[in-house]
Image: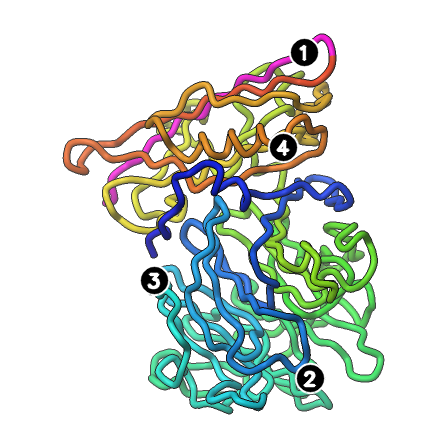
């Protein structure tokens, strides 16, 4: 999927950039940021090319009015485009990058006025305001009455059916036939929630009827039970689950999202959503960006405030790139969204190198260039630089961008608009486009150079540079 058009007006774009939440505190090793959308979010979030797909609705009510839910695509810079409308109750979604298809579970087929539902819908990633109907059904309406989470599994799809009362199950869809053949992968659950592929195995989250405590279970590729990883416990929820870069699980469905290590003790990944009260992460989906550069999740406090309209993000500090400055100022600013590699294994990694169309290319297409999703993070609590403690940032500027006029300038302007600031935060941009040379046969080069100036006296500066190289596809 190619990125959706973005506004070129700086003022129009600034409203959608991530805002800082002073009450929200991430776990050690993460930076928190969020992008506030125009509508309340619901259930579904999936990483796409150059942004995320998000489920939204006009109001939080149960049951919601049929056919009032939508999917929007939100670019890295915050621009929203409606992709599909007419959904009833969104459970979860998963984006197939290779096929440019979004798979969405809908469990509201029995709501008054619904013409289809209780199934999995397939939506073209390029669609704009497409009304979902029978043509989008992967399965006939009513096939999965309590369709909840969805995940890829060895070329097929797993869908949880949160029926309750010991009737909950995980259904496997054989994608080699159309419509897919359905079979029970695992059964006899109460309320099944999140599901994901874990190596060759599957992990399923379950909420137990009556007490509503929660568990994580592991199954082999044939659906044979192997072990209970966690629970029953109230320490985490069961709505959705993702795999963190360190091998632990991130689980939503509680008053926070929780890190659940295999054989370890669960701990919060973030606190202070909804001011620390209510069920701020209760109704939220969760998604991990390829490469482990961020965790994106939704929240539902049932109050309708900004938490309920936001794409929330946790950025692992270890994935950020310092700009080769002094170690006592490096934490003042670091780059997000790029990874330094070396063209020669025996030399230091100094360049962000991407191949046209690879996962590092935000537009996801082999189209004669690479879009580097460069972001900007300030006041980073980075344990890699023990002698650095940011006193806060009072000024931020883009010194140079090649090519000129890239979205890095919008990001720098958005960050400057929030200063002075002493909180750790990241601003995402719609990327720096580097074109290939010689009719697409030779590598193209770009760079971004910025300067952060500290608050206080004497002022300190952190000048950072990242060089970008786009290589032709094979």
Q: Secondary structure at mark 1?
A: loop
Comparing 395 with 366, the one in front is: 395
- The residue to which callout 2 is attached is 189
Kindly state the secondary structure of the residue where label 2 is placed.
strand
Distance from Cα at disc 2 to Cα at disc 4:
48 Å
Nearer to us of marks 1 and 4 is 4
Q: Which residue is mark 3?
A: 126
* Residue 186 shows in the view: no
Q: Looking at the figure, which quarter contains the C terminus? A: top left
For marks 3 and 1, the one nearer the N-term is 3
Q: Residue at x 67, y 29 (%)?
A: 379
Q: How dense is the environment of label 4, judged by Cα within 10 Å: few (below 14), some, or many (20 and up)?
A: some
Q: Is residue 313 above or below residue 331?
A: below
Label 1: few (<14), some (14–19) or many (≥20) C-alpha neighbours in 10 Å: few
Q: CA distance from mark 2 to mark 3?
A: 36 Å
Q: Residues within 10 Å of mark 2 (few under 14, many from 20)?
A: many
Judging by the rendered image, the residue that carries numbered circle 4 is: 418
Earlier in the chain: of badge 3 and badge 4, it is 3
Q: CA distance from mark 1 to mark 4?
A: 18 Å
Answer yes or no: is residue 228 visible: yes
In x, y percent, where is residue 365? 30, 51
Which numbered marker is on residue 459? 1
Mark in the foreground, 1 or 2: 1
Residue found at x 54% / y 87%: 109
User: Percent from the top left, x then y, of residue 221?
Assistant: 52, 74
Look at the image and give the residue range highlighted in magenta: 457-474
**Majority SS type along the magenta span:** strand
């Amino acid at each position: 999927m190619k990125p959706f058009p973005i506004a070129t007006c700086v003022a129009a774009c600034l409203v959608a950039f991530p805002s800082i939440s002073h009450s929200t505190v991430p776990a050690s090793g993460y930076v928190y940021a969020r992008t506030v959308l125009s509508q309340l979010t619901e259930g579904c979030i999936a990483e796409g090319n150059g942004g995320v797909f998000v489920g939204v609705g006009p109001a939080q009510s149960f049951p919601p009015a049929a056919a009032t839910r939508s999917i929007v695509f939100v670019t890295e810079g915050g621009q929203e485009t409606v992709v599909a409308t007419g959904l009833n109750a969104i459970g979860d979604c998963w984006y197939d990058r290779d096929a440019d298809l979004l798979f969405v579970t809908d469990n509201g087929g029995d709501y008054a006025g619904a013409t289809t539902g209780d199934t999995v819908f397939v939506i073209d990633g390029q669609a704009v305001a497409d009304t979902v109907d029978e043509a989008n059904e992967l399965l006939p309406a009513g096939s999965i009455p309590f369709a909840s989470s969805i995940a890829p599994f060895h070329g097929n799809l797993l869908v949880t059916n949160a029926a309750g009362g010991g009737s909950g199950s995980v259904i496997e869809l054989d994608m080699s036939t159309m419509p897919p053949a359905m079979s029970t992968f695992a059964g006899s659950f109460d309320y099944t929630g999140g599901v994901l592929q874990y190596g060759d195995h599957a992990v399923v989250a379950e909420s137990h009827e009556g007490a509503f405590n929660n568990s994580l279970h592991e199954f082999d590729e044939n659906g044979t039970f192997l072990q209970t990883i966690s629970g029953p416990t109230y320490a985490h929820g069961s709505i959705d689950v993702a795999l963190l870069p360190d091998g632990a699980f991130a689980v939503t469905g509680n008053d926070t999202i929780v890190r659940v290590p295999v054989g370890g003790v669960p701990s919060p990944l973030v606190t202070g959503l909804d001011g620390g009260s209510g069920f701020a992460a209760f109704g939220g989906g969760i998604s991990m960006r390829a490469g482990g550069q961020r965790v994106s999740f939704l929240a539902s406090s049932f109050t309708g405030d900004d938490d309920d309209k936001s794409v929330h993000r946790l950025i692992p500090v270890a994935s950020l790139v310092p700009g080769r400055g002094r170690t006592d100022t490096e934490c003042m600013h670091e780059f997000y969204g790029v990874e330094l590699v070396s063209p020669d294994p025996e030399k230091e990694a100094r360049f962000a190198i991407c191949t046209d169309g690879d996962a590092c290319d935000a537009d996801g297409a082999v189209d004669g260039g690479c879009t580097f999703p460069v972001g900007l993070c300030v006041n980073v609590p980075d344990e890699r630089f023990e002698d650095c403690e940011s006193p806060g940032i009072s000024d931020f500027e883009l010194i140079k961008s090649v090519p000129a006029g890239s979205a890095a300038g919008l990001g720098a302007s958005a960050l400057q608009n929030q200063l002075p600031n002493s909180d750790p935060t990241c601003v995402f941009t719609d990327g720096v486009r580097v074109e290939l040379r010689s009719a697409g046969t030779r590598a193209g080069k770009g760079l971004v150079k910025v300067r952060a100036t500290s608050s206080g006296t004497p002022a300190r500066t952190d000048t950072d540079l990242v060089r970008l190289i786009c290589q032709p596809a094979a």
